[in-house]
Image (tube, rainbow, N blue to C red):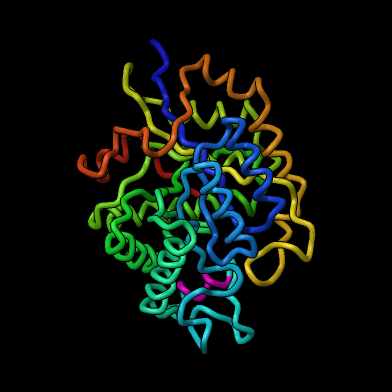
Amino acid sequence: MARPRVRLVVTADDFGYCPRRDEGIVEAFLAGAVTSVSLLVNGAAAESAAELARRHQIPTGLHANLSEGRPVGPARHGASSLLSPEGFFLGKMGFREAVAAGCVAMPQVREELEAQLSRFRELLGRDPTHVDGHQHVHVLPGVCQVFAEALQAYRVRFTRLPLERGVAGCSWLETSARAFACTVERDARAAVGPFSRHGLWWTDAFLGLSTCGRHMSAHRVSGALARALEGIPEGHVLTAELMAHPGYPSVPPAGGCGEGPDAFSCSWERLHELRVLTAPTFWAHFAQEGVQLCALDDLHSKRPDDGVPGEATLETFLEPSHL
């Protein structure tokens, strides 16, 4: 049986985090290895990143941030359930713990999301092509509902559903990374309902949890695609998104979202992703297997007027993972 053809969007996250990261992301876009970017509007280099996006006509979405750095909305002027006493977001795990404990006021989440959407319009002069979540905060319980409402109000239709098929079986992932990926998958599965009810849409498949950083290689990406394609009828054109974090590593103190760059952004793994993605043989290999890179605007299987997949359709492409 012939392998189904795949239309793949490659999204570089954290655009605007620092000039060095942005330089690498633009390099990957110009090389044809990245097809869209997600902008952190509270990033230290957000303004220069927006200029780069305009200059090079890079399809740009919003990387909604509720977990790192300083807010851009009303919360920056006073006490907020989103912030520490020092005025910063609560962190990747701290925000999750606060949400789980019921300590986060969802109206304040809505205010911050709307402020970031407005800031995006100020920077780019248009609406985002898509909105996803920094550190996957957009699929957290409660947050996903407010997130979907805000996107609907701003007429943004495309988001990310970070459900990667078979990620629980990826033994090369560190224990903590695999546990986090499975938690993200659980939250994403629960977010399908709110996302669907508010008219959001996404690709058939998502890749990137099992291929992040040092784990990115042609072999790993090919494996993730193969898992996504299992059971897909011959002739079906699968749409997929590959999440990536390429760039030249940050060098403190430059970068970050108000607190300086974190270890993730300073890591050599950012350069590794950049080198893998821009290697000429990397995409030549996938082209031979029927993988076509495209921008979000080129996708047709999930157009806004076609609706979005419900649970039954989702199950065709994705299966649950368990710790």
Residue 200 in the image, given as x and y percentages of width and height = 30, 51
Query: Relative to 260, does residue 26 appear above or below in the rendering?
Result: above
State whether residue 166 appears in this view: no
Q: How many marks?
A: 0
**Residue at image coords 67%, 39%:** 273
Q: Quadrant of residue 46?
A: bottom right
Query: Relative to 286, does residue 241 appear above or below in the rendering?
Result: below
Residue numbers of the magenta segment: 94-99
Using residue 266 as the reference point, say whether residue 124 is left or right of it: left
Give yes or no for residue 95 being in the magenta stretch: yes
Main SS class of the magenta portion in the image:
helix
Residue 18 in the image, given as x and y percentages of width and height = 68, 57
Q: Quick one: which residue is furthest to the bottom in this view?
A: 78
Give yes or no for residue 195 being in the magenta stretch: no
152 or 229, nearer to the observer: 152
State whether residue 21 appears in this view: yes
Using residue 232 as the reference point, say whether residue 43 is left or right of it: right
**Residue at image coords 73%, 45%:** 269
56 or 246, nearer to the observer: 56
Query: Relative to 36, does residue 49 appear above or below in the rendering?
Result: below
305 or 136, nearer to the observer: 305
**Residue at image coords 58%, 53%:** 15
Q: Quadrant of residue 32?
A: top right
**Residue at image coords 47%, 76%:** 73
Quadrant of the image containing the N terminus:
top left
Residue 262 in the image, given as x and y percentages of width and height = 71, 62
Residue 179 in the image, given as x and y percentages of width and height = 57, 53
